[in-house]
Image (spheres, rainbow, N blue to C red):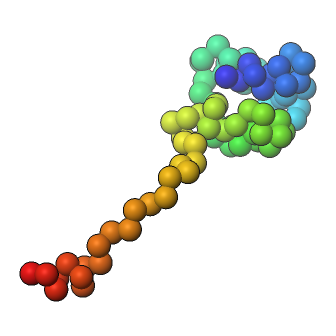
Amino acid sequence: MIEKAIDHYHGSRSALCKAIGMTPQFLSQVCTGKRPLPPRYAVLIEEVTGGKVTAAELLPEVFSPRSTSKPTPSTPASAAAGKA
């Protein structure tokens, strides 16, 4: 998925590195799977791409997409106690 961020910079790994403050060597290691992408860089990539590449896309195990479902209210303990 980091390739999508590189594509945002017209295929320039160097431009992406400069935009997020990452060394080209580290980016190369991330691209080849030798090193994981640190969450701080996922957030920076989301910021510099204007949200076109999200942190959740880059690291779904860390940044899960926000849920749009509404939480269901639970029965208050006082109401449940009155039925016993």
The quadrant of the image that shows the N terminus is top right
Outermost residue, left side? 84
Q: Quadrant of residue 12?
A: top right
Along the line of sight, the residue nearer the viewer: 31 or 5: 5
Q: Is residue 44 left or right of residue 9?
A: left
For the point 58% across and 43% down, the residue is 65
Q: Residue at x 63, y 32 (%)?
A: 57
Residue 21 appearing in the image: no
Q: Residue at x 60, y 17 (%)?
A: 33
Whether residue 46 appears in this view of the structure is: yes
Looking at the image, which residue sits at the far front?
83
Q: Is residue 73 left or right of residue 9?
A: left
Quadrant of res 31: top right
Q: Quadrant of the C terminus?
A: bottom left
Q: Position of residue 29 (x, y in %)?
A: 67, 19
Image spot of residue 13 (x, y percent): 84, 20
Q: Position of residue 4 (x, y in %)?
A: 75, 22
Question: Which of 46/38 is in front?
Answer: 46
Q: Is residue 64 above or below residue 53?
A: below
Q: Is residue 64 left or right of residue 19?
A: left
Most foreground residue, 38 or 57: 57
Whether 24 is drawn above or below 55: the answer is above
Q: Position of residue 24 (x, y in %)?
A: 80, 22
Q: Quadrant of residue 34?
A: top right
The image shows a total of numbered marks equal to 0
Residue at the spot x=38%, y=68% of the render?
73
